[in-house]
Amino acid sequence: MKSRVIQATWFEYDRYGDADVLVERSEALPPPGEGEVTVEVITTSLNHMEAFLRNGKESTWSDDPWPRRSGSDFAGIVVATGPGSRLPLRSQVIGHVRTGAHASHLNVSESALVLKPPSVMWEVAGALYLAGVTALDTLEQLRIGQGDTIVVSAAAGGVGSIETQLAKHRGARVIGTCGDRNFDYLRQLGIIPVRYGDGMADRIRRVAEGPVTAFIDNFGKDGRDLAEDLGVPESRYRSSADRRDVELSLLQDDPDSVEHGTTQLARLAELARAGAFRLLISGLYPLNDIVEAYDDLAHLHSRGKVVLATKPATTYRTVKAREIHEAMTGGYVA
Ligand SMILES: NC(=O)c1ccc[n+]([C@@H]2O[C@H](COP(=O)([O-])OP(=O)(O)OC[C@H]3O[C@@H](n4cnc5c(N)ncnc54)[C@H](OP(=O)(O)O)[C@@H]3O)[C@@H](O)[C@H]2O)c1
């Protein structure tokens, strides 16, 4: 098919720093190559790992050339196809890239795409990859299933909210640590909420009704001591550092890693379609408000995912339920 010239915009950075080092750049996109398609991005999400790579806290990719692009999850529409590609034009897809998803358009190999189930909303679809596949990989590594009682920290966050729901879907009894504001939310999902902070081990024991058999520490504070105190076997404990390794491997762009990521993304999309989990959108920002969106993420009180949209229905700022709660209780207000 003859491709028209597409002017793409994207966010990238020329040095380490906070989100305000991100700059918007624009260029005509070359036509998609062999086995590639051009995707017009509708939604893309934010992950802490991208912030760590940008601010230098994560040094794994320190040899990458500058400038460096941002973003790994996206959902969008196929608007051009390269030689040998099989996806029809206008296919609605969910995908992943090592970096560069915070963009209006991108060229991507078909091997990194799955079809978006029509019932999965764009906001959710564009937020699925890194958080969702991290959750799925971690639960599979731990072989979570019936008979397990699992504790998940930061249970209402992007990764934790998927992890807890999928653990429950696999038959486990699930305890999630969170702040007071998220008790009702977790209870609605059938997750047992426990407040984080001093005395947490006793609070967990009180609700566990038996041994805790697995522990996933997303937050990365005191997790190992707590897991040990609860008698969780070392082999069934996943630290925040383990999560880092899972995330970095999901961002690799060698063929085996991409294939694994895409296979898991397809399973996740099907689980979302089937209602095995529901992903809340903690904040939906226009792509151009990326700095504000990262600031929201950095406050560490997301309920679900922070998402960017290239075509938001409105550019008015959306008040989040948690802000109403916090304004009433005197907590953080964005
Ligand atoms: N080691 C790594 O490489 C690595 C990689 C990615 C992420 N992380 C960390 O993992 C955490 C969760 O990741 P995410 O992607 O799910 O982020 P997220 O969506 O930003 O997580 C936000 C959640 O963290 C919870 N939280 C805040 N303070 C907490 C505390 N002291 N103890 C337990 N939970 C707390 C919040 O609960 P409430 O709102 O209920 O307070 C909120 O629901 C983040 O802190 C992130 O920095 C580590």
Image (tube, rainbow, N blue to C red):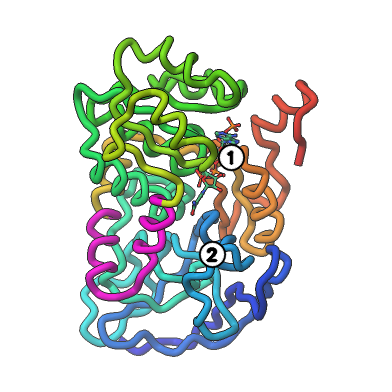
Please say if the residues under marks 1 and 2 sit with CB atoms less than 8 Å apart: no
Quickly name the residue at label 2: 58
Quickly name the residue at label 1: 302
Q: Residue at x 64, y 30 (%)?
A: 321
CB at mark 2 closer than 8 A to ligand 1?
Answer: yes
CB at mark 1 closer than 8 A to ligand 1?
Answer: yes
Comparing 64 with 294, the one in front is 64
Q: Residue at x 36, y 33 (%)?
A: 215
Residue 89: image x %, image y %? Answer: 32, 72
Viewer-nearest of discs 1 and 2: 2
How much space separates mark 1 and mark 2, taking CA atoms? 21 Å
Residue 164: image x %, image y %? Answer: 38, 32
Q: Label 2 is placed on what type of residue?
A: Glu
Q: Which residues are magenta?
A: 242-265
Q: Label 1 is placed on what type of residue?
A: Ser
Ligand 1 is found in which quarter of the picture? top right
Q: Which mark is residue 48?
A: none
Does the magenta run of residues contain 247?
Answer: yes
Q: Residue at x 47, y 41 (%)?
A: 218
